[in-house]
Amino acid sequence: MRVLGILLIVAAGLVLQTSLTRFTIGGGWALDVVLVAVFFCALSWGPAAGLLAGTAGGLAQDALSGGVLGVGGLSKTLVGFLAGAIGTQFIVAQFFPRLVVFVIGTLVHQFCFWGIYALIDQRAPTVPMGSVMMQAFINAAIGLLVFQIIELAPGFASRRRARRSRLSSGGRW
Amino acid sequence: MLEIRRRTGYLFLAVMMGHVILISAQVQDQGGARLASAVTFQLVSHIQLATARAVDGIRGFFQNYVWLRGARAENEALKRQVVELGGQIEELRARTTQVSSLEELLNLRTSLPIETITARVIAGDPTPGFPAVTIDMGSGDGLRANMAVIAPRGVVGRIYGRLEEHAAQVQLIVGRRAGAAAYLERTGAGGVIVGSNADPPLEMEDVSNLVDVQTGDVVLTSGLDGIFPRGFMIGRVEAAERGSGTYRLIAVRPTVDFSNLQYVLVVTVPPSARWAQEAEKQ
């Protein structure tokens, strides 16, 4: 059941990625919603979930982008597993630790991704630093927002239910 | 607990090894990867089409009824018309270039008319750094792999991978693994345009240090690659330096605004025999 949930989250990330980037093709904006989905799975359910999400998301992106199949898969599997392992070893339930995981995770992913391509092409890697940094912070912003929404949503619903029950009991009285 | 951790570690190692083997296999031969790409695109293209329709539906509701009531539809039609007219201008430019070449060759050959189909962009880059888009036209609309894709201002890219009935993937010229045969309009010097991660995102390679290259020089497709017809605008030279070896280092700024790509034109002239065979294999 959890495997299906992870695959659905990754698929949603992929659809969102292609839908959002449709309006920012080739522009200065760079984001990787699939990577955010991988971090989300890893931080929520641990390294095995990060590994599965990273493999599925990375391979799907490779297949769609026309690049070498496995490069994105390997990079995302690595960062997904590492993020999951960090999530189980340290407390990353607060804003700042999560920000660090998202930013550093994105940077590691990008250097791994472009590094493997440099090895395959046997050319010096040309990492677009501006774009990579922007992607790290945009990914972090999206990821933190998603965590915030998910964590606040149940509380919001229960508070609303409690307010309604208070109002209804008050009316009867 | 330790057993579970150890098992996850083994799984991680196995998956990483799998990826390495997969990458190594493709460096030799892309056979297996093509099938995986085709299956993934087949699955995702339907979702992309549905998502694009849903997103456009919501956008359309606000833009056509809530905000502008009709003006937006007219604007969309005009935009499509501008793209088509732009395509015709590019076609005329290409044909003019061909005509002058033919004049030089004492009219020994006749040029073929270039026909295009207008397509809408329905999805963007699946991976940052590998610019690609999905369009709402496919094999059912007469498109084939390796057909050239242009915009009013110049070359956009080429169709790659397996096509769906009403969806196709376009590799943008600014992509890291994209390229096109090109020449400088002013001097006629030929070279190869390749995409890069740098800014500007195009580089012109294989142009000798002896060739005079100036900032602002227009770069056009030469047609030698068998995909892009001759004479389509690619961009303008932004910087040209003398290289340490035989060739110049030329940075080219594309004329197409890739950040606002809504409609494109697919040149329906079939690619050369070599690329047609390549597409057949796919």
Image (cartoon, coloured by chain):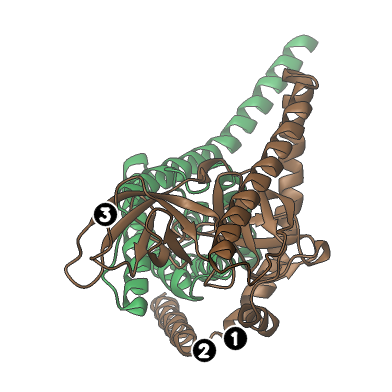
SS type, badge 1: helix
Give me the residue at 32% from left, 42% from top: A96
Name the one closer to the observer, A142 or A97: A142
CA separation in Å, label 2 and label 1: 8 Å
The mark nearer the N terminus, 1 or 3, is 1
Q: Provide the residue designation for mark 3.
A: B240
Which chain is green in the rendering?
Answer: A
Q: Residues within 10 Å of mark 2 (few under 14, many from 20)?
A: few
Image quadrant assignment for residue B245: bottom left
The answer to whether residue B2 is visible is yes
- Report the amino acid beneath label 2: Asp
Q: Which color has been applied to chain B in this rendered view?
A: brown
Q: Position of residue B276 (x, y in %)?
A: 67, 79
Q: Provide the residue designation for mark 2.
A: B29
SS type, badge 3: strand
**B274 displayed left or right of B269:** left
